[in-house]
Structure formats: structure tokens, C-alpha cells
Image (cartoon, grey):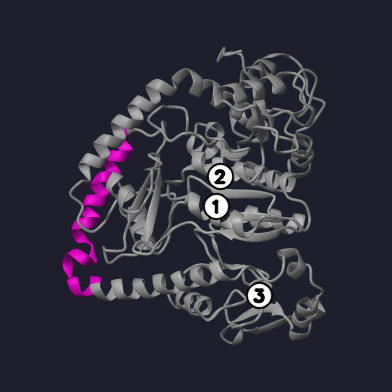
Amino acid sequence: MNNENYSLYQKLEELYKTDEYPFHMPGHKRMDRAGIPGDMAHLDITEIEGFDNLHHAEGILREAMKEAAHLCHSEETYFLVNGSTSGILTSISAAVKEGETLLLGRNAHASAFHAAYLRGAKLRFIFPDFLSEYGLYGIVQPDEVKRALEENPQAKAVMITSPTYDGFVSDVKEIATIVHEYGKILIVDEAHGAHFGWDERLPESSVTAGADLVIQSLHKTMPALTQTAVLHVNGGRIDRELVRRFLRIYQSSSPSYLLMGSADHCMRVMNSHAKEWFDLFFRNRTAFLKQIRGLRYLQIPDENFCRDNSMKELDPGKLLILTHKSGYTGWEVQKILLQKYHLQMEMADEYHVVAIVTVMDEWSGLQRLADALKEIDRNCPAAKKERDTQEIAGHVSNAMYLLEKVLETERKNAPVYTMRDVLDAEKEHLETVAFSDSIGRISAESIYLYPPGIPIILPGEHIIPEAVALIQQYREEHLPVQGMADQTGFTVRCLNKIREHKYVEA
């Protein structure tokens, strides 16, 4: 079972070498002249004899998923070919029924809000720490989870994100203990932590830390194709038949064998090479951090950052480059890295840049990044003119202040209506108003800065003055505010006054 060479990927390769002719999908018939790159076309098949069916796995796919569960220390593991999105939709749908309450980290991925909409679930929020100096969401503290559970005893499940996009890791083991003491289900969006648990120097995986449902994106941090992910299921708190039902609903009925083969191969090669690969990974990471130790204005969080911000640990696979003291925005640093140094980052926002580093990275790439950051640090506006730094710092502080005020209000006020109530409202119950005049109204739109895509305003929430001011500031800076039907940002869709009163009366 642990034989790396016996895998779905190998069986696909063997099929191509036979003289078996494909009178079946896909239409390229595995022919080179289709113009699809070599191995992709050669290995791309459908559910044919001997290759099993993801939605009713009895053969090679069943064994591949059993092997994945064994390697990840999970009771059950399912391959996901629609990315972590399908795993999040499935997990929430299986855990929370219509009208029931989900305790959700406010920094959740958009798919979690989509699941709440699809299931007609009520949302109550768990708030991660907000690191106001850096404009970042931090970890979810166990005490915050306990507070939310005490205030919402009717909740059926809790969902948090760990690690975050920025690499902050919550204490999932302690959170799981608290959630289970209250008899609830714990879902962890560990999309960015598929590598956790593969080496003792990495953070513990939420699978072994006690979560009931864990979603991991293999393609984000592991050697696997885009859209490959897994859903791990543990314990008896979740109805596993419901999990399987929603997997059939949210996953394609024609799952890609290329993707499933890649997921299977990823697990097997990691099992064979994790030790040597992570030895090299940590050597390279240590050498990189040593090289950039002298940075004055750009910052990369380390163990001291963890201690100062009440964090247990950081994801070593993330390089978080803080730009707020440099005189540059994160977007500007990302642009310089790409245009001048030909280094493409994972993402950036106003205050920082994120780079993902995996066991597949080579020292040459890290060396180039270290050299680039040192040169940018020497030549940034803060290094040239202290006045520029003070002006930008004041401007940044205003945005952070407004965001903090938004979070404070969100802590005190739960959404007035479910997302389904508002998004499915009849058109005659909606109206478009000037955004500047929308304060106090019920939003029928989700408004966010992308990246990172964390909602500032959700459908069903009151629009508050600080949120309007924050979004208007982002607009003035030409930052990517998204979610509004009016892409100019001058108007927003709200419930009309008559409909608002009807909801209140109900």
C-alpha cells in the first residue's frame, strides 16, 4: 500500500502505452495533434473500466484515498477536484442546516459565505486578532471561540481559518477541546497548510489536532496540480453520509483523472521524500533569513513577532514582507519585484506582500529574492526621505483606524438577516442608493478589498459610517474594491425601507 510506484498516475501512464482505442470522452482522444501538451492529453480519461468512479469509489480511487488518509492520519480522506472551495461548501452544508447557526471566523474565505447563503444558515462571527500596527488579521484566540460559544449556544458548528493566507497559525488543539466541550463540530479551513504534519519542524496539522473536518489545498503548498485538494473527516460528530451527499452535489460529475492522479502521486512522493525535501527547505529558509537580517524598513516576521502578538507559531512556508514602514505599499513592492527583478509574488495588499515557499523551491530563487529585497530596502522612500515615511504612516494609520472601528462595530452587531433573506429578495424589495447616503441601511451586497477578499460589509448587515469612510478611502487610492454591482462604487444595492420594516416586524 505504501509503494510509491503503484499509483493512479502510473496506471494512467500504462494505459497510454497500450493499443486500447478510446471511443469515450474526452474529445481529444489522447492524440498529440489535439494540441494539448503531451502527458496532459495522454493521461486524461473518463470513468472507464478499471479506473473506478470518484463518487462511488470501490477500486483504485478508493485505495488511493485510503492511502492519503493513512499518510495524513485521518479516518477518511476524499479527493477534491474543485479545489478547497468544494470542501468548504461540503463541510458547512453537512454541518449546518437551513435556519441553524454557524460560528464563522470573520476572515473566512468567500466560499464559506457562499455555503451559508446556499444552506440558508445564520452567521455569528468569531473575530481573529487584528494587528493594527500592520493592518493584518492574526490568529483566532481560544478565549474568543469560547466567548462566541457562550453567547450562541444554539450554534451547530464552528469554522476557523488556520493558517491564514499570511501564515498565522491558531492553536487548533486548544480550540478543538473547547468546541467539543460544547458538543459542537469544528471545521478548519487549512487550505494553506496541506504541508503541515509532514515534518516535525512544521506546525501540527488540524487533522491530528482534533478538528472534525479539515480542508487542505494540495496545489497551494505541495507538488500537485491546481484544483487538487482533500477533505479529511474524523470522529462521530459529523454525519458522514451527508458529507458524501454534498461532495456529490458540489464536485463535478466528470472528475479529472489528471487531477486525481496528481493528488495521489503527491501523497506518495511526499511519503518517500518528505525528510530529504524538508531538510533542504529548512536549510534554504535559514540561509535566506540570515541574508535579509539587515533590512531596516521592510520587515519579515519571526519568532519575536509571534511572541509580541500572542501567537504560537508561523507557517514557515510563507514569507510575509511587511511594507508599512518603507514608504511603499505592498502593491508597489510587488510591482517592483516583478518588473525589475522578474520575481512573481503570491499576493499583495496595501500593507504587505506574501511569497509562498515550498519543498520545490530552489536556492537560486531565494537568493534572487534576498538580493532584491535588500536593494529595495536601501532605495525605498523611507530610506531617502523621512518626511515621506511620516506622511504615508499617517495615511496608513487612518485606514487602519477605520478598519479597527469597523471590526469593533461588527463585534457588537450580528447580521440583521441571513444572506439568503437579502440576496434572494424580490427586485421590488431592493433599491440602489448613493453609497455616501447608505449609512444605516441594510446592504444587499458584499463589499471587500481583493486581495485578501475578507468582507468589510456583508449582505444583511447595517452599513456603518466607518465602513463607508474606509471604502471611500480605498476608492480614492484606486485600490481594488470589489463586490458592488456598480463598479464605480458610487452606488450600492440595499433593501428598500418597506422591506426593512417587514423584516423587522417579522
**CB under 8 Å between discs 3 and 2:** no
Residue tagged 1: 146
- Looking at the rendered structure, the secondary structure element under dot 2 is helix
* Residue located at (80% from left, 28% from top): 56
- Quarter residue 119 falls in: bottom right
Dot label at residue 443: 3
Dot label at residue 334: none
Looking at the picture, tell me which residue is in the foreground, 286 or 464. 464
The correct choice, above or below, for 324 with respect to 305 in the image is below
Q: Is residue 188 magenta?
A: no
Q: Quadrant of the N terminus?
A: top right
**CB under 8 Å between discs 1 and 2:** yes
Looking at marks 1 and 3 on the same chain, the residue that comes earlier in the sequence is marked by: 1
Looking at marks 1 and 2 on the same chain, the residue that comes earlier in the sequence is marked by: 1
Q: Amino acid at mark 1?
A: Lys
How many other residues sit within 10 Å of disc 1, few (<14), some (14-19) or many (≥20)?
A: some
* Residue located at (33% from left, 58% from top): 333
Asked whether residue 341 is in view, the answer is no
The percent coordinates of residue 49 (x first, y second) are 80, 19
Looking at the picture, tell me which residue is in the foreground, 228 or 158. 158
C-alpha separation, residue under disc 1 versus residue under disc 2 = 7 Å
Asked whether residue 305 is in view, the answer is yes
- Looking at the rendered structure, the secondary structure element under dot 1 is helix
C-alpha separation, residue under disc 1 versus residue under disc 3 = 29 Å
Q: Which residues are magenta?
A: 363-389
Residue tagged 2: 178
C-alpha separation, residue under disc 3 versus residue under disc 2 = 34 Å
The percent coordinates of residue 314 (x first, y second) are 38, 43
How many other residues sit within 10 Å of disc 2, few (<14), some (14-19) or many (≥20)?
A: some
- Looking at the rendered structure, the secondary structure element under dot 3 is loop
